[in-house]
Image (cartoon, rainbow, N blue to C red):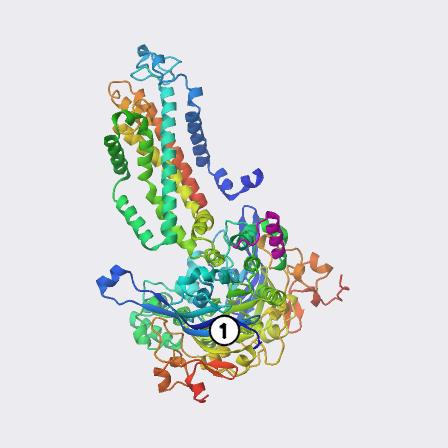
Amino acid sequence: MDLRTLWQHDLAYSFRRSPVTIAAAVLTLLCVGGALLAPWIAPSNPFDAASLDLNAAFAPPGWSAQGSAGHPLGTDDQGRDLLSTILYGARISLGVGLASVLLAMLLGVMLGLVSGYVGGRADAFIMRIADIQLSFPPILIALLIDGVARVALPAGVQDSIAIPVLIFSIGISGWVQYARTVRGSTLVEKGKEYVQAARVIGRHPLAIMLRHVLPNVLGPVLVIATIHVATAIITEATLSFLGVGVPPTNPSLGTLIRIGNEFLLSGEWWITVFPGAALVTLVLAVNLLGDWLRDALNPKLR
Amino acid sequence: MTSAPSLLRLEGVGRDFDVSRPWLNRVVEGAPRRLLRAVDGVSFEVRKGETLALVGESGCGKSPLARLIVGLYAPSRGRIEFGGVEISDPARQAAAAPLRRRMQMIFQDPYASLNPRWRVREIVAEPLLVLGLLKDKSDIHERVVELLRQVGLAPEDGEKYPHEFSGGQRQRISIARALSGRPEFLVCDEPTSALDVSVQAQILNLMSELQARLGLTYLFISHNLAVVSQIADRIGVMYLGRLVELASADDLFARPRHPYTRMLLDAVPDLEMSGRARTPVAGEVPNPLAPPPGCAFHPRCPHANERCRSEPPKLIAHGASASACHAVEEMRI
Amino acid sequence: MTPVLEVEDLRVEFPTRRGSLVAVDGVSFAIAPGEVLGVVGESGAGKSLTGTAIIGLLEPPGRIAAGEIRLQGERIDDLPHERMRRIRGRRIGAIFQDPLTSLNPLYTIGEQLVETIRTHLDADAAGARERALSLLREVGIPAPEARIDHYPHQFSGGMRQRVVIALALCAEPRLIIADEPTTALDVSIQAQIIQLLKRLAREHGAAVMLITHDMGVIAETADRVAVMYAGRIAEIGPVRAVVGAARHPYTAGLMGAIPKIRRAGTARSPLVQIEGAMPRLNAIPAGCAFHPRCSKSFDRCRGERPELRRAGPNLAACWLYDERPVPAQA
């Protein structure tokens, strides 16, 4: 498909017509770009212990009287430049968010496909596990897995493995929504005649699931995933805020908010407010994009 | 025709579906299991090169029967043979596989029978790949082009997606797909019911032409007697899962024996406007879950007697045709 | 006598971002009291949309772009919603294709009948129930006193359609619009329902606009028939003349394409085939919409769109039937 037809495609048309969506997309792009390019565009590397200057601690934002241009958003209690920590922190938040969504999606889509196509006992088993998991709040599940990992793994390994464990726990807590949606769509597609035709031709059930059914059930998954990214980022932020997420040596936006929280009432408001604003902006932008995608892909609203 | 060998043979084929309420509900409400006899004791054979049509209204079991024949599910009772070898035994599917390759199916709904995410050339080539008939890419491409031309489409159509085609064109694609593995036997489940009249004519003509050219054998399923008249050599009439009459097309239309067949023929609208007298039709098809005892048709039959209400009639041959009716057997009608 | 329904130059359009699509293009016809007019055509011909426009149930962005619709002499195409709602049901009765969705599954058929009767006629509860019972008897529902309190799902398809017919007749409408009333039913039931509709229309003196793709149903039921193609009327005339001796090449092709029960002894022959397919709304040919598929087309057909003109007992929109001498085939 060449660029012109892409531009004129229904999806692109709906996108062009919604200023809110365009703004959200631009914002998301800025956040993602900033996070990705952090090592190059941040004024300084806040995690390089050598570059820290305790004398610069608690500097207010650049535009206020005591601030300096070198620290446009001020510094935190350890002298780290806030703009840099936000950029690096966003990297962690986004990274963990995206990775855990990917895990949840892979697991959920696979289980949903098997559940819907194979049916019978496998279906009953998978769906009962899903039901049981749904009775727990996702944060609790993530906390649980995280807690178990802390106890089970030797102390020295904990820090380096903290992020993968975090990704794993957030991912596991979120597979059910994908599985359920894909299962429903699979049941519908299974009854359609093109699947029966493939069976008459003699196609192996696995091939039918992956080559025939999967492409037709992925649509809603994309919408769920986009909105799930926002949720995953918030979950990670919450866990980090509670102190059980990423280690403090590699802070995400949530950790930053927690750190800054202590100083909120003593006047150094910027240490918590700016990371907070960054988090809110990122999540809002992703949510708006997800909303647009869901409405745009809904054939009934067209 | 009678000298041609039998290609497909059904003996006492039956299929039940369990439509009971979920286990939990049954236990709590004390409800019994419910079994739907979709197909009940059907026997017939299809000879090589001929077109056998199965007609009937909703609930008669013609669609489940088609699916039993191509192996989408196994029969609950009875035996299906293809080319002399049994193919209905679930325990011997490996032995049946090479025979199954010689049969293919065409479905009713042109909008649901093609995968919307696949290109047409992928759809048509799928049997070739699965059956391992051709390996070389250019060989496959050539065969796909040949098939598309055979069904009246252009070679460029292979690059398009199904939604770019009309209903009639999609059925052509389905036919091309069915033919790609060079089958001998095609089961056609109401292939033109969803199409407009003028498009139906194109597809029926195409199917007749392909049959003559490629030596195909058809099992053609329809609810429309006029369509069937156009294409069938022999016709089987089904009612509530049973075969009630089986005769050559000429015979069936000239001398229908079973009262249901007569009723069906009477219901066909009179386009010649000859003003012929028609017996008013009575009643509706009963609930398949609770079929009437004895002959399933007796509540609607003007010739029903005591025997009809208690004893299910067997399919009995009278010369070249057969019917399952006590009144016919007793020569009352 | 004033016709019950007069449609003049009706034009239904669907504005899209790529321009306006014309789904019904200059359709005119009239139905006399007690007459059954069949409107037949293949999918995309615009016959259902014509019916929907007349009832006033056109879904936006579809709209009536031009033309007039008159019910018993009064214009109804430009009425405000409230007035149209009162006319619908009282003077126009509607029967749609799917009896399952035409009835509300949550109310008994008695409740639905009584509600309609009381909305449009001046009747108290008891009187309305009496009328409902007599209607059910008329449409052939056995044991109506018991069945009037049953829910739609307790009826079979054919019985449900009878209830829908009763519902349409409730308020003694002058016009009944039936859109594919028998398509979802078995063949043997179709025949019953057609007979019923025809008899009741005659007895109640209502005119019927019967929309269907099934020529057989038309042949059995209609007095006159209009054949639609690509949003226009190709031919209109008495049913015998159109079905038996079609003048327009499309109608002739259509009749030839319909399979008929072969008489014994005659050989099987291929059905008449009209090449191609009905044009999509965004690609309707200039001039006569049928000309690319017509074996009899000539120069004039490509450039000028023919209006309905006399062709024997029928009217046909075809240049073959021009009063002026026809030029030699191009």
Q: Is residue C143 magenta?
A: no
Residue under numbered circle 1: B45
Looking at the rendered structure, the secondary structure element under dot 1 is strand
Q: Is residue B134 magenta?
A: yes
Q: Position of C283 compared to A108: left or right?
A: right
Q: Quadrant of the N terminus of chain C?
A: bottom right
Q: Which chain is home to disc 1?
A: B
Q: Which residue occupies the foreground of this view, B316 or A24? A: B316
Residue farthest to the top, as pictured = A55
Q: Position of residue C311 (x, y in %)?
A: 67, 70
* Magenta stretch, main secondary structure class: helix
Amino acid type assigned to the residue bearing label 1 in the image: Glu
Q: Which residue occupies the foreground of this view, C206 or B105? A: B105
Q: Which residues are magenta?
A: B131-148
Q: Which residue occupies the foreground of this view, B52 or C46? A: B52
Q: Position of residue C195 (x, y in %)?
A: 47, 76
Q: Residues within 10 Å of mark 1 (few under 14, many from 20)?
A: some
Q: Position of residue A208 (x, y in %)?
A: 45, 51
* Residue B265 sits above or below residue C168 on the image: below
Residue positioned 41% across, 28% down in the render: A31
* Residue A147 sits above or below residue B185 on the image: above
Q: Position of residue B256 (x, y in %)?
A: 50, 82
* Residue A247 sits above or below residue B81 on the image: above
